[in-house]
Image: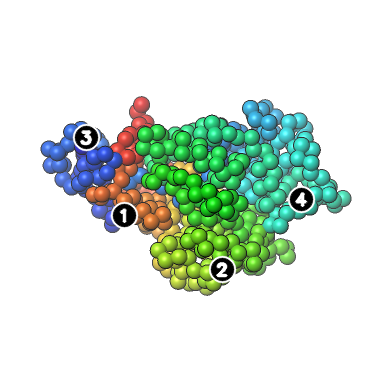
Amino acid sequence: MKTLYYNGIIHTMKAPGDTVEAVLEEDGIILQTGASALDSMADEKVDLRGRTMLPGLADTHQHLIMLGKMLKSLALHEVQDIEEMKQQINDFESTHEWNLILGYDENNFPDQYRMSHDELDALTDRPTLVTRVCQHAGLVNTRGLEVLGLDGSTEDPEGGYYERDEDGNLTGWAYDKAFEALRAATVDDDVESLSGDIEVAVDHLYTYGITNVHTEDMSYYGPYELPLEAYMKTLGPDRKKFRVNLLRHEAVYDEMVRDEPAFLEGWVEKDAMKLFMDGAFGGKTALVKAPYEGTEDHGIQIHSVEALESLVRKARANGDAIAVHVIGDKACELVVDAIEKYPVPEGKHDRLIHCSLLDASLIERMSRLAVICDVQPTFLTSDMPWVESYLGQKRMEYLYAFKTMQAHGLLLGGSSDAPIEAVNPLLGIHTLVTRRGEAGVYNEDERISRHDAFRMYTYNAAAIINREDRAGLIAPGYYADFAIFDRDVMTVEADELLEAKVERTIIDGTTVYDSHN
């Protein structure tokens, strides 16, 4: 059946201001675009009533299952009152063995208030893990430490540590690889529970016009087979319509290469080897060249150079690209060194995820490599109130330097890192075009155009996964994946982006979300 979309503002995303009057699709593929005269060919017509249609949006880096868990669990991301936070923790009781509480952010509270495990003990006697918003640190209560058999004699893992007091006792706070071990120990999921998390997250993503995400979930919920089976069971052309690309974490990469599990083309597809090189600014674990202000601390280097190169060689031996978490400039430099030494296979490109702090020489080197950058614009607005006190004014020029990166020819994909940040792409686009948050405006020279900002969530996102011939544009032969907004998000005043709503999301020619139903 042929369906015609007409009587709206239809942005193709081919070029700034490029619009068409109508779009005709059949069986999930766009047949023609052009004038409303196409209506003679249509079996069904959809009147856009003056609304604005874009290609379906994509998020190039997030944690979809974790997003589903956040939506079903206790999340502290927006809590700004200490007593309110404590009351919420006190009242919360999970249906799982562990209480998992997400989104703690000391920067939301006066004087960067940091909860102690004694305070957490007073709120709950169940094993409880409170994760910092960055998902690189967390606090576990005494009961949790007992369940896990952790005490002052526990050795720190390479690439992470358990914080200790002056007597050598664990404080309950853990960072990076130590935190990952804590988080993994709290898992008691099965395929059914993970499928439920996926469904909840996808329903939420529909409301923002998101039709595809690139996600990293394969190593956090038991054996990789559990999340993979949950995705395969939940998503597809005859199930819940949504498209995902699955990064394969270094911890399960060997198994996934060995097992060669089945994927579902166009819906559930495998992606690069994922690894971490450093932490985050909030916990001062991002790896930086110069130390953090007032300290001699450079952050955490998760992999030695030898270990990093070994992982890169492994990916290359299997014809794969790598996708590396790099927030600090030193972390990025080490990864660029390794990529230069062991180039990505022809026709593929490596991913540098976050690329928060760079410098001129790094950007120049990156521009000569087959790399793309998955960036999170709202990191800028989250970090603005405090990050200069961590890094100093001199380094601010190359913090989230999106326009400079773009000017050097780097392909940037827009993402949220949800649930670390809110998933709404319009928040990221607003940041890209204004560089403004609650703390004011930061480095206006790095603003980019509205068209380029939306391209990061449409065409660029498709190009990152080598799907630019069928996704990210409104053109014949492309997926009939659309986001329909209540206003022209390409031309309204920038602040109006924060008020814009998606009225309808369409995937494979099927309406999966309608705000009026």
Quickly name the residue at label 2: 338
Residue 299 position in % (x across, y down): 68, 60
Tell me the distance, in whole angstroms, between the alpha carbons under discs 1 and 3: 23 Å
Placement of 195 over or under 413, stated as above or below? above
Count neighbours of disc 3 (C-alpha within 10 A) and say few if under 14, some if 14 to 19, many if 20 or more: few
Instruction: Residue 74 in the image: state x and y as whole percent.
Output: 61, 33
Q: CA distance from mark 1 to mark 4?
A: 49 Å
Q: Answer left or right for 498 relative to 154.
A: left
Residue drawn at (66%, 47%) of the image: 180
Q: Secondary structure at mark 1?
A: loop
Tell me the kind of residue under disc 4.
Glu
Front position in the image: 148 or 281: 148
Report the residue marked by disc 3.
1
* Snapshot colouring: rainbow
Quadrant housing residue 29:
top left
Distance between the alpha carbons at the discs numbered 2 and 1:
30 Å
Identify the mark at residue 163; answer none if there is no mark. Answer: 4
Q: What is the three-letter code of the residue carrying label 1?
A: Asp
Indicate which disc, 4 or 3, sits on the residue closer to the N terminus.
Answer: 3
